[in-house]
Amino acid sequence: MDHKLHTTPVAFCPRFHYAVELIGRRWTGAILRALLAGATRYSDITHAVPGLSDRLLSERLRELEAEGIVTRTVFPEMPVRIEYQLTEKGKSLETVLASVSTWAETWVDDRTAVARCDEVERAG
Amino acid sequence: MDHKLHTTPVAFCPRFHYAVELIGRRWTGAILRALLAGATRYSDITHAVPGLSDRLLSERLRELEAEGIVTRTVFPEMPVRIEYQLTEKGKSLETVLASVSTWAETWVDDRTAVARCDEVERAG
């Protein structure tokens, strides 16, 4: 029997599935990268991620907050200051994102990546 | 000046952005995981990934072929046999997917993941 799957069954892993689609959701990887690099304010993130609209950034930050990856703190100053910080769960994504970066450095061609980013910006 | 981004600028990385959204595209992570575990045939993959429709599997395999991550080989037998194999570029995603798995084992709750998978299946 040459049907590999019958001898080595592949268990589908819901946790893996959930995690990979969470970090790969449109713009989420780039937003997490900006937060890991020290961005804390809304405007820091929009400056760090070209092409990301305000609407999508709000949506993604709300999702990340709901996932327990980001905290949102409101400082009652004048004007009000809002800061986004990664939780422990969020910070521990650093290893994951670093391994994506390493793979991308080796295998993703600059032209492919830039062409794709243009596409994302037009659609975004 | 407490505005971190001004002192440590975060360069947006198109290669990273491209890579993270490629592996996180709907079902792609789960398909890659099945291929890494030894699935080579269309039916192996559909059995390994519950909820994945034929239409979406074809679409994802075509994309992965276009990205140079998967090769498709047609064996002119009766009946025709088609095998999907990861290229070197595809195989080298193993480290990335392993780091996603490690993160997921620690941080993703079973109930969250299962609830989300149900959602995906209904929509899929």
Image (cartoon, coloured by chain):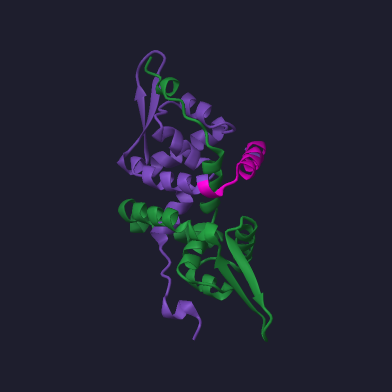
Chain colours: A green, B purple
| Residue at x-position 53% and y-position 32% | B49
Q: Is residue A75 above or below residue B26?
A: below
x and y percentages locating residue A37 in the rendered image: 45, 68
The stretch of residues the image draws in magenta is B106-122
Q: Nearer the viewer, residue A94 or B72?
A: A94
x and y percentages locating residue B84 in the rendered image: 39, 30
Q: Is residue A110 magenta?
A: no
Q: Is residue B108 magenta?
A: yes
Side (left or right) of B59 relative to B9: right
| Residue at x-position 36% and y-position 15% | B77
- Main SS of the magenta segment? helix
Q: Is residue A119 above or below residue B101?
A: below
Q: Nearer the viewer, residue B68 or A85?
A: A85
Q: Is residue B101 above or below residue A110?
A: above
Any part of residue A122 in sight: yes
Quadrant of image for the C terminus of chain A: bottom right
x and y percentages locating residue B81 in the rendered image: 39, 20
